């Protein structure tokens, strides 16, 4: 059995996928790299097949019809045989020295039969044109280099949430919790780092910069204009998260740890803020209506949650008219921009 499965969702990735895959091959035979060709129309399939031919013990390629990022992640998980599972997008890469340290640490945890449900490292916003890149680290929130539980997790600062870039899950946990991301939808990575959390009992954090998250392509999903154009998909993800958090059958697990519930609430709050901010920045009647419909949806799903979120600074800024409301909206926008590091 492999130590780590890395799924690489690819769609028309011929221009940059080699940098990503080359950075992953350094893991050697401990690693299984599953390249998921999500119905690409360029040379992605041929490049992927070449890597499989050159590295048959490490690289596996799955060709499928286009289903979007979530569908590609689902496919990678379905084919995963490693003890641990990570997603690396095809325009990103891992830092060699940190990657080797992570694999060594994971081996030690396996040898000691102390497999964490979730393993975390720092990630770097590698934004085009910037000489200094922002690092998202968790040393103020999480114990370092030791196994810990939710009881030992401290407060997360705004913008320092657990994202797909920072997380490695125990593969069987993802399968056991029934994670299934929506197809033909962007921003499903928010679901990926939300729904499994109530099943996570033990965690491990290494304070090293592992994942380099490239930001700079004009067609990238975190480009502000692109996000506004895909507001329907952002809202869809937001509703799925609201459904999950408010579903009665999930309540016992979510409420099992106070810090877990608070973290999930804070994450849902920032996602709802981002959805609302994008609609306000768009400032079209259609998008403003979508914002109101989202808050109505939250109201109907759970009135107490609606009141709590509306009474916070984010909720107020989404609902107050006039100069004061616009000022608060700008502040909320800055936090949303910090969270996504819009390009």
Image (spheres, helix red, strand yellow):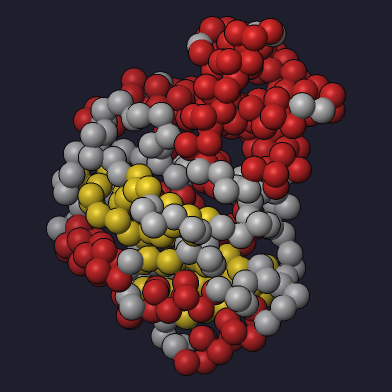
Position of residue 14 measured from the top left corner of the image (x, y, whole percent): 62, 77
Q: How far across and down, in percent of the image, does residue 200 sit?
A: 36, 40
Instruction: Residue at the far bottom: name it.
Output: 54
Going 48% across and 55% down the picture, which residue do you hit? 127
Q: Is residue 333 above or below residue 54?
A: above
Judge whether residue 216 can be spotted in this image.
yes
Q: Split into 4 quadrants, where in the image is the N terminus?
A: bottom left
Q: Residue at x 76, y 43 (%)?
A: 229
Residue 30, quarter of the rendered image: bottom left
Residue 41: percent from the left, percent from the top?
75, 75
Residue 11: give x, y in percent of width and height.
Answer: 66, 68
Horizontal relation, residue 285 to residue 246: left or right: right
Q: Is residue 148 visible?
A: no
Q: Residue at x 31, y 51 (%)?
A: 121
Would you place residue 212 above or below residue 224 in this image?
below
Q: Residue at x 41, y 85 (%)?
A: 57
Please identify the quarter of the rendering in which residue 276 is found. top right
| Viewer-closest of 32 and 225 | 225
């Amino acid at each position: 059995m492999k130590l780590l499965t890395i799924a690489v969702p690819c769609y028309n990735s011929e221009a940059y996928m080699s940098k990503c895959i080359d950075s992953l091959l350094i893991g050697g035979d401990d690693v299984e790299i599953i390249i998921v060709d999500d119905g690409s129309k360029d040379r992605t399939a041929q490049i992927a097949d070449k890597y499989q031919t050159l590295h048959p013990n490490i690289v596996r390629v799955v060709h499928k019809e286009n289903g979007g990022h979530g569908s590609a992640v689902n496919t990678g998980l379905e084919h995963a045989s490693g003890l641990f599972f990570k997603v690396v997008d095809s325009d990103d890469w891992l830092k060699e020295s940190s990657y080797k340290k992570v694999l060594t640490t994971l081996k030690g945890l396996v040898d000691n039969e102390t497999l964490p449900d979730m393993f975390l490292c720092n990630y770097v916003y590698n934004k085009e044109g910037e000489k200094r890149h922002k690092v998202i680290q968790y040393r103020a929130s999480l114990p370092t280099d030791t196994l810990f539980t939710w009881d030992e997790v401290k407060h997360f600062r705004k913008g320092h949430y657990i994202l797909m870039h920072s997380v490695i899950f125990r593969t069987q946990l993802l399968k056991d919790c029934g994670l299934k991301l929506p197809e033909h939808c962007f921003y499903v990575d928010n679901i990926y780092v939300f729904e499994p959390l109530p099943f996570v009992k033990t965690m491990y954090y290494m304070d090293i910069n592992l994942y380099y998250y490239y930001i700079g392509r004009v067609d990238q999903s975190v480009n502000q204009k692109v996000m506004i154009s895909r507001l329907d998909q952002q809202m869809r993800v937001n509703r799925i998260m609201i459904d999950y958090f408010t579903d009665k059958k999930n309540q016992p697990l979510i409420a099992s740890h106070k810090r877990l519930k608070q973290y999930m609430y804070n994450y849902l709050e920032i996602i709802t803020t981002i959805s609302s901010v994008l609609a306000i920045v768009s400032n079209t009647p259609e998008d403003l209506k979508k914002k109101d419909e989202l808050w109505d949806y939250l109201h109907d799903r759970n009135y107490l949650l609606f009141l709590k979120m509306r009474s916070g600074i984010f909720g107020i800024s989404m609902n107050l008219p006039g100069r004061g409301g616009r000022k608060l909206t700008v502040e909320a926008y800055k936090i949303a921009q910090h969270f996504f590091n819009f390009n």
